[in-house]
Amino acid sequence: MTRSMTAFARQEQVLDTGTLSWEIRSVNQRYLDPHLRLPDQFRALEPKLRDQLRNNLTRGKIECHLRWHPAEQDSQLEVNAALVQQLNDATNQINAIVGPTHQYSALEILQWPGVLGQQSLDLADLQQSALSLFKSSLKELIEHREREGLALKDLIEQRLTAIQGIVVEVQQQLPSILSKQRQNLHDKLMELSAELDPQRLEQEMVILANKADVAEELDRLQTHVQEVRRTLLQKQAIGRRLDFLMQELNREANTLSSKSIVAETTLNAVELKVLIEQMREQIQNIE
């Protein structure tokens, strides 16, 4: 499956205790590069989150941001009844020794550290909800990457078809091109060296014609195009392999240009390089 590395996913879940929301952004990167932004009470999830990313993605810079908005009731104060009882018992013991010189008011007791606290949350359930929501958000991100990947695949297929058309056109023109070049070489050598041995002239023309023969390059271009198409059908990550194949296609196009002996072949080689570069730019964003 061809996947793009550019995608976005956002999901939200409303709980009785508050609202969780995940935002995951993905852009192209040579390797997998995850970045996690988590509230303090969710830090323990980081190893599991990274495992999820490694198990589902192979390339891309992945920015994952978790937001937690507690519900209003979570901010209600809660009295630590056990601590208040301990403070009261201690006060009674002191009064028994020194006498009831001072009776503490409720307000004074509330000022003691730890007597008042925020209503506690069940962190285990909350973290599990965040982890489940992350899995769902990651699935949405992958689906987005796959949709983008299908669009990129179509663009690459269009250019592969255009490359094949150019290769076929050059192959059809090749016999005529070589025949004309042979005649041109013969005429030039005859003008420059009328007294040379005819057999030597023939040998020189054969050497020059072989240097100008691009049949091998055209065959390799066809082979590389077929390999790109085969790679696009693979299930695993294919971006690096496609990038390598673009280098090989470009190498053959450069050789075709350097061995060109007529303007038409030169123009075809230039068009090949334009198409290959367009594919290469798209492939930089494929996982």
Image: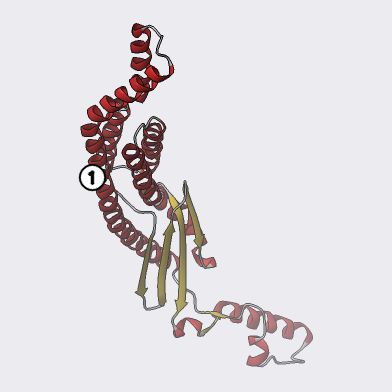
Out of 32 and 278, give the one closest to the viewer.
278
Q: Splitting the image into 4 quarters, where does residue 209 fall? A: top left
The total number of labels drawn is: 1
Residue at left offset 29%, top offset 48%: 156
Out of 135 and 270, give the one closest to the viewer.
270
- 91 on left or right of 169: right
**Above or below, comparing residue 6 to residue 242 in the picture:** below
Q: How is the image coloured?
A: secondary structure
Where does residue 242 sit, x and y in percent of width and height? 36, 41
Where does residue 153 sit, x and y in percent of width and height? 28, 50
Q: Is residue 1 something that shows in the picture?
A: no
The residue beneath circle 1 is 161
Mark 1 crowd level (few <14, some 14–19, many ≥20, 10 Å Cα): few
The amino acid type found where label 1 is placed reads Thr
Q: Is residue 182 something that shows in the picture?
A: yes
Where does residue 11 sit, x and y in percent of width and height? 35, 69
Where does residue 57 sit, x and y in percent of width and height? 38, 49
Q: Splitting the image into 4 quarters, where does residue 224 fall? A: top left
Residue at left offset 37%, top offset 51%: 282
- 21 on left or right of 217: right
**Above or below, comparing residue 4 to residue 265 in the picture:** below
Secondary structure found at label 1? helix
Residue at left offset 41%, top offset 72%: 20
Out of 226 and 119, give the one closest to the viewer.
226
